[in-house]
Image (cartoon, rainbow, N blue to C red):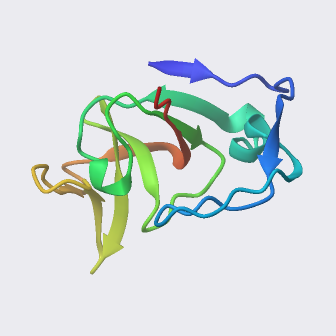
Amino acid sequence: MLHAVALDPSPLPLPLAGRMVPAGFPSPADDYLEGEIDLARLLVERPAATFLMRVSGHSMSGAGILDGDYVVVDRSLEARSGHVVVAVVTGEMTIKRLRVTGGRTLLQAEHPDYPVVVLGEDYPAELWGVVVGVVRKLA
């Protein structure tokens, strides 16, 4: 499922707390706001080339991309080895990590139950874009 991103999304600035939140041991909180962040501007650098996709499956869970997440995909970026990409392989869309090694181009899952896809003349792929962000609602 593709979701278009508005060409000029309306800003929605949210308050930015002045401290980082430790993910380890609790720390006293400050009642201090540092400013505001607009999530659309943070996640979308090139609106005309950006879209959202909803993830289905578990092959990228090792990269922190979970079933039901939305990924922010930028079609204007050149995909490089190490990038997470959206690709079309044999007519099916997939999200995987792009690896170029030893003259081979691979699409690698981030879960041990999924095989590596070796791309080539007999197994071509069309790269749709580079994943630049993940959106997940927790509650």
The answer to whether residue 63 is above or below residue 39 is below
Q: Is residue 68 above or below residue 34?
A: above
| Horizontal arrangement in the rendering, residue 51 relative to residue 43 (left or right) | left
Is residue 139 at least partly visible in the picture? Answer: yes
Image quadrant in which the N terminus is located = top left
Asked if residue 2 is positioned above or below residue 47 in the image, the reply reads above
Query: Looking at this rendering, what residue extends furthest in the left direction?
Result: 113
Q: Residue furthest front?
A: 28
**Residue 63 is drawn in which quadrant?**
bottom left
Q: Position of residue 26 (x, y in %)?
A: 53, 61
Say whether residue 45 is visible. Answer: no
Rendered residue at 21%/48% (across/down) = 123
Query: Residue furthest toward the right?
Result: 35
Q: How many marks?
A: 0
Q: Is residue 120 left or right of residue 21?
A: left
Rendered location of residue 113, percent (x, y): 9, 50
Residue 13 horizontal side relative to residue 138, left or right: right
Res. 126 image quadrant: top left
The residue lying at 30 percent from left, 29 percent from top is: 56
Which residue sits at x=27%, y=81%? 102
36 horizontally vs 77: left or right: right
Is 82 or 27 nearer to us in this picture? 27
User: Where does residue 110 sit, x and y in percent of width and height?
Assistant: 26, 56
**Residue depicted at 43% across the width and 33% down the height:** 69
On screen, 137 above or below 1? below
